[in-house]
Image (spheres, rainbow, N blue to C red):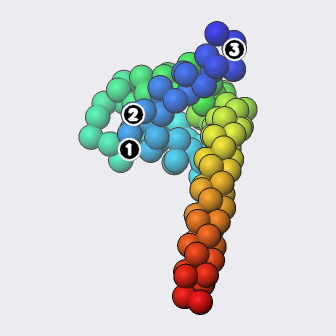
Amino acid sequence: MDEDAERLDRAFAALADRTRRDLVARLAGADATVGELAEPYDMSLQAVSKHVKVLAEAGLVTRSKDAQRRPVHLDTEVFDLMGKWIERYRREVEERYQRLDALLDRMVEDEDGTRAEGAS
């Protein structure tokens, strides 16, 4: 398996959890410490820290040191990779729908032509 496929596996697995998706959504607005991230949840600081660790191992977030703070922030590289993967399949599905639309249009045209000839 290539490296990009492994990164996608880790990222999608990490985002399978609702709490981690919520953490990512909150971090999209601004960096935050684990303590700040833990505030709205009815779970321990340690539990939130484990969620952040899973996100970090998946390459979705990084932590830096800012004096006494250790803010967590999103890392866009993996999100770019995920976006490209999703966009590829979105385009393929869109092309399938366009082919179906074209086929249905031809069927309607054929049906209308048959009706017109039969009506004469």
What amino acid is labelled 2 in the image?
Answer: Asp
From the viewer's side, name the closer residue of 80 and 116: 116
Asked whether disc 1 touches disc 2, contact meaning CB atoms under 8 Å apart, the reply is: no
Total residue callouts: 3
From the viewer's side, name the closer residue of 10 and 72: 10
Q: Categorize mark 2 by other alpha carbons within 10 Å: few (<14), some (14-19), many (20+).
A: few
What amino acid is labelled 1 in the image?
Answer: Glu
Residue at image coords 27%, 40%: 42
- First-in-chain label (1 vs 2): 2
Residue 92 sits in which quadrant?
top right
45 on left or right of 53:
left
Answer whether residue 96 is visible to the viewer in this image: yes
Screen quadrant of the C terminus:
bottom right
Labels 1, 3: front one: 3
Name, please, the residue furthest toward the top.
1
Tell me the number on the disc at residue 29.
Answer: none
Q: What percent of the width, then of the height, locates residue 24?
A: 53, 41
- The residue wearing badge 1 is 39
Q: Secondary structure at mark 3?
A: helix
Q: What percent of the width, then of the height, locates residue 37?
A: 45, 40
- The residue wearing badge 3 is 3
Name, please, the residue furthest toward the bottom.
120
- The residue wearing badge 2 is 17
Residue 77 sits in which quadrant?
top right
Residue at image coords 36%, 24%: 46
Q: CA distance from mark 1 to mark 3?
A: 35 Å
Up/down of 101 relative to 22, above or below? below
Answer whether residue 112 is visible to the viewer in this image: no
Name, please, the residue furthest toward the left.
42
Up/down of 109 relative to 91, above or below? below
Q: Secondary structure at mark 1?
A: loop
- First-in-chain label (3 vs 2): 3
